[in-house]
Image (cartoon, grey):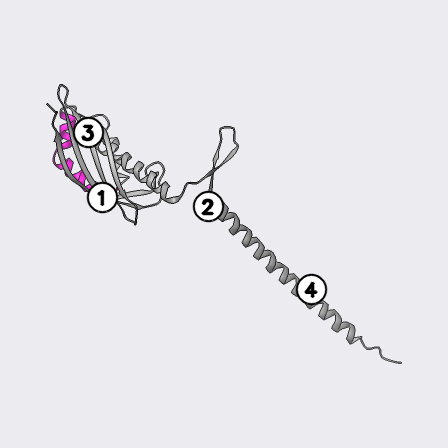
Amino acid sequence: MKTQFPNYRNITDILRLNRFIVLAVVIACLLTSAMAIWTVLRLNRQMMGSAFAVNTDGTVIPLKLVSQKENLAVEALAHLELFHRYFYGIDDSNYEKNLEKALWLGNASVDNVYRQKKADGVYNRLLQYSLVQKIISMDTELDLSKEPYGFRTETVFEIDRGSVTDRYQLITTGNLIRVDRNFPNNTHGLLITDFFENSLRKIEDEP
């Protein structure tokens, strides 16, 4: 009786075919992964130049972002205006709430000025005489060439003492640094540092 041996040539061909299939699958997976990564990166670059808002009817509206420099200038001015209005635009009914909001916009240097004013009895006089401190105008100079961003703000405010109203000019300086946005306490993502009241003078009425 003659013994039948397997066809080794057919086995070799099958192994080669299996190896080719495995290599083809691996290469296809690598190409698919690379294509997916490239697509995600391309979409991310496109999304960085756009923002989206939801309309009242639920539709999504694409919005183009302004350049980072222009956006920084707008937000820095808005941040400083908001801080000065909270910190200096106070009366006996809102000073605690306004000062709490102002302290979110600056670091310990702002808190130090607040504590000094409190120790000097500024807020006690506000309550005792029902004073109203009202911001009239603000003018800010910014240096956005490098971080921290320096600022100088000239604030004109009035103090209403009932029958008498006095007007003052206050010069404040400091720096701004970037921080994480905190809604609703610090929506601009900026923080005032090195805050200092440089000068305060009473504006005399012109004759």
| Spatial CA span between label 1 and label 2 | 31 Å
What residue range appears in magenta? 106-128
Q: Which residue in the protein does label 1 denote?
A: 174
Identify the disc placed on residue 21: 4
Residue at image coords 60%, 58%: 31
Q: Does the stretch in magenta take in 75?
A: no
Q: Which residue in the protein does label 3 denote?
A: 157
Circle nearer the N terminus (2, 4): 4
Apparent side of residue 11 relative to residue 203 in the rendered image (left or right): right
Amino acid at dot 4: Ile
Quadrant holding the N terminus: bottom right
| Spatial CA span between label 3 and label 1 | 19 Å
| Spatial CA span between label 2 and label 4 | 40 Å
| Spatial CA span between label 3 and label 4 | 80 Å
Vertical arrangement, residue 25 with respect to residue 119, above or below? below
Q: Which residue in the protein does label 2 denote?
A: 48
Amino acid at dot 1: Gly
Amino acid at dot 3: Phe
Q: For the residue carrying disc 3, how many other residues have a C-alpha within 10 Å: few (<14), some (14-19), or many (20+)? A: many
